[in-house]
Image (tube, helix red, strand yellow):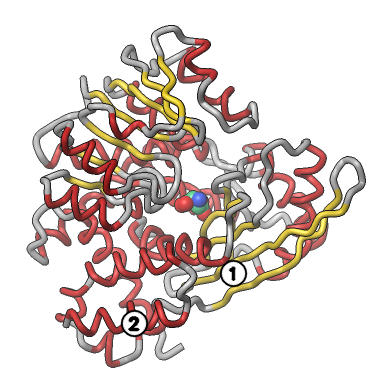
Amino acid sequence: MGNLVQQYIDKAKAKDPNEPEFLQTVEEVLTSIEPVLEAHPEYIESGLMDRLIEPERIIQFRVPWTDDEGKPHVNRGWRVQFNSALGPYKGGIRFQSNVYVGMLKFLAFEQIFKNSLTGLPIGGGKGGSDFDPAGKSDAEVMRFCQSFATELYKYVGPNQDDPAGDMGVGGREIGYIMGQYKRITNQYDGTFSGKGVENGGLYGRTEATGYGIVYYCREMLKHFGESLEGKTVAISGFGNVSWGVTQKLNQLGAKVITISGPDGYIYDPDGVTAGEKEDYLLELRASGKNICAPYADKFPSATFYPGKKPWEVKADVYIPSAMQNDIHLEDAKNMVANGAKYLCEGANMPTTNEAIKYLQDNGVVIGPSKAANAGGVACSCLEMSQNAEHIVFSAEDVHAQLENIMVNIFKQCEDACAKYNLGDNFIAGANIAGFERVAKAMKWQGFV
Ligand code: GLU
């Protein structure tokens, strides 16, 4: 059977050798679903596996826009509509200079299983552009978003594809994109999620991803008879996800001792406590400078370590909440040397496959991103539902639904581990539980 899975990995490599992130996730997922394929040879015989790793559709388009001096620029835009077996394509839009089709394929592929784990009717997609919003004026961002939406609108819709935000795309960008979509289509139909509440957005969506990660982490610790209360937590990033994670951890009595940015990391032994410090994360992000160093200027208890990562700090729990491939083998070695026990992935695919193996071999329990960070997209789906019903859910209602969804996601991982004798390998548990639902839906829909 090992050879059979390897065949698909090799096929993917031969087709798209220049898409390392996509190949990394294909390898991770396929390797861990082997036991399901052993039990269901029909998934192989019916060509389901070949279809699973091939996007249904990829749209690439030109995004022309002018800066404030009237100078013309041309960027690339994409939407990867990977799998619609469970529902309309669903996934964020990322604006970052290093975005290319392979990165979006990796994110869309992960999204299939993540969305499946939520139990909600959403397929997997992702989009974005190599546009870098850093340092752009508000007017430039608006013109770019309008141009992006002028092409994207042809391929999205409430029952077709429902994009949301991701790195570089927040409420402001979604607002501009949605505004242009509405202007062209004359439809106020909830096609985009992560909107501001005045635009039909969901109360509680902003903190949903971060809160969801902490709920998942709490359930994972509970599985071992432990709680987050009194634990020290090292996190990376300082954006929306890190902020939500920090806020919920503070509420549950844990202490966040690091944050990070592309410039280095901050160590604050007193904790990024609720109130001024927690709020400062939002200020830092809103500054548009994408650096975390100013935190140490503002709060004397903190030290800034330029050019370094927080994984060298001793902590009870690690929560990478910044970006993919943040934790490499040498970081994993630092963590193990510091006695690490738990890693809960906040960002999408933040740990390299090599680092995962090292951590698991050394007894570190990993909460996988596909499961742990599914709270954001789950709440996006609640937003779709709110828009379709023309009603407004309260923040309390959303928080309660989110908590239920996350508890249920951890349970699915736990159950899959028990069913296939996987011990505490929640990465495999999440991949299997996510895959089983998609595979059943694909099977019933025939060879399409
Ligand atoms: N970008 C988020 C994610 O990675 C949210 C996607 C969505 O809400 O559609 O899951």
The residue carrying pointer 1 sits among few (fewer than 14), some (14 to 19) or many (20 or more) residues within 10 Å by Cα, namely some
Q: How many discs mark residues in the rendered view?
A: 2
In this orientation, which residue lies closer to the viewer: 179 or 78?
A: 78
Q: Say which of 347 and 15 sits in front.
A: 15
Q: How far apart in space, not on screen, are marks 1 and 2 (Cα)?
A: 23 Å
Q: Is residue 209 above or below residue 231?
A: below
Rendered position, 146 above or below 318? below
Circle number at residue 49 = 2
Q: Is mark 2 within 8 Å of ligand 1?
A: no
Percent of width and height locating residue 78: 63, 65
* Residue 75, x across and y down, in percent: 73, 59
- Give the crowd class for mark 2: few <14, some 14-19, many >=20 residues within 10 Å: some
Q: Amino acid at mark 2?
A: Met
Q: Where in the figure is residue 263, as x and y percent of width and height?
A: 51, 31
Q: Quadrant of residue 150?
A: bottom right
Q: Position of residue 195 (x, y in %)?
A: 62, 44
**Residue 206 shows in this picture:** yes
- Under circle 1, the secondary element is loop
Q: Residue at x 31, y 15 (%)?
A: 269
Residue carrying label 1: 160
Classify residue 39 as left or right of residue 448: left
Mark 2 falls on what kind of element? helix
Residue at image location 30% in from the left, 38% down from the top: 215
Would residue 243 be seen by someone viewing this image from the given angle?
no
Q: Which quadrant, please, contains the N terminus?
A: bottom left
Image height of 102 relative to 298, above or below: below
Label 1 sits on what residue type?
Gln
Residue for point 23% across, 36% down: 334
Query: Quadrant of residue 392 in the image?
Result: top right
Q: Residue at x 52, y 37 (%)?
A: 206
Left or right position of 386 against 181: left
Which is more foreground, mark 1 or mark 2?
Answer: 2
